[in-house]
Amino acid sequence: MTRWLGIDLGEKRVGLAVADGDVANAIARPLATLVRGRSLEEDAARLTAILERERIEELVVGLPLDVSGDEGLQATLTRTWGEALAVRLGLPVAFRDERLTSHLAEARLGPMKRGRSGGPPSRTQRDAYRARVDREAAAIILQDELDTRAGRRSSTGDTQDPQETST
């Protein structure tokens, strides 16, 4: 049984999702949201316990492509981070187009809850909601990769193989 970790890498947070089983039957589910470290080493250290506990065998990292499908600066930074992390952890990595995943995650979760007495949400509420969105986006990224590998259409409508790299 293979176990995958989906990763939605952001500047402040890292959304995580997990799936296991064979590709045809695997279902991704949100797992956790971590605060980004100041370095790759800090991020790897935070992920190591999760990887060991969940017995992860492969990473799937969301790649923030430009609207045109090209890799811009953020996609290049994400690819560099993902490849370095995979080498450091000794795991294969695949990159999955993540365009629209945060939007889809927000649609799945519904609107952010209002604050007290119907006012604007508090900072704590906003942070908690963003963390949920990051986890849900990671699940969408991972499920899209699994669906593509199984020959099914992904939730983002992408039927082509993503830009992948294995380490």
Image (cartoon, rainbow, N blue to C red):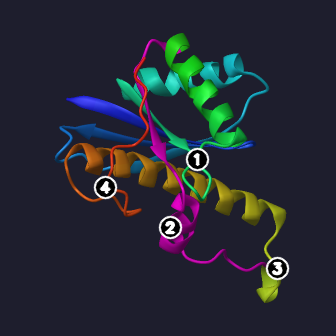
The reply to whether callout 3 and callout 4 are in contact (CB within 8 Å) is no
Q: Residue at x 31, y 55 (%)?
A: 159
Q: Quadrant of residue 127?
A: bottom right
Would you say 29 lies left or right of 127 here? left
Q: Report the disc number at residue 104.
A: 2
Total marks in image: 4
> Residue 55: x, y in percent?
36, 24
Q: Nearer the viewer, mark 4 or mark 2?
A: 4
Mark 2 / mark 1, whichever is N-terminal:
1
> In this rendering, which labeled residue sits more in front, label 2 or label 1?
1
Give the Cα separation between the discs numbered 2 and 1. Answer: 21 Å
Where is residue 96 drawn, in percent x and y? 45, 43
Q: CA distance from mark 1 to mark 3?
A: 37 Å
Q: Nearer the viewer, mark 3 or mark 2?
A: 2
**Cα distance between the residues tagged 3 and 2:** 23 Å
User: Looking at the image, is mark 3 or mark 4 earlier in the sequence?
Assistant: 3
70 shown above or below 126: above
Q: Residue at x 66, y 25 (%)?
A: 43
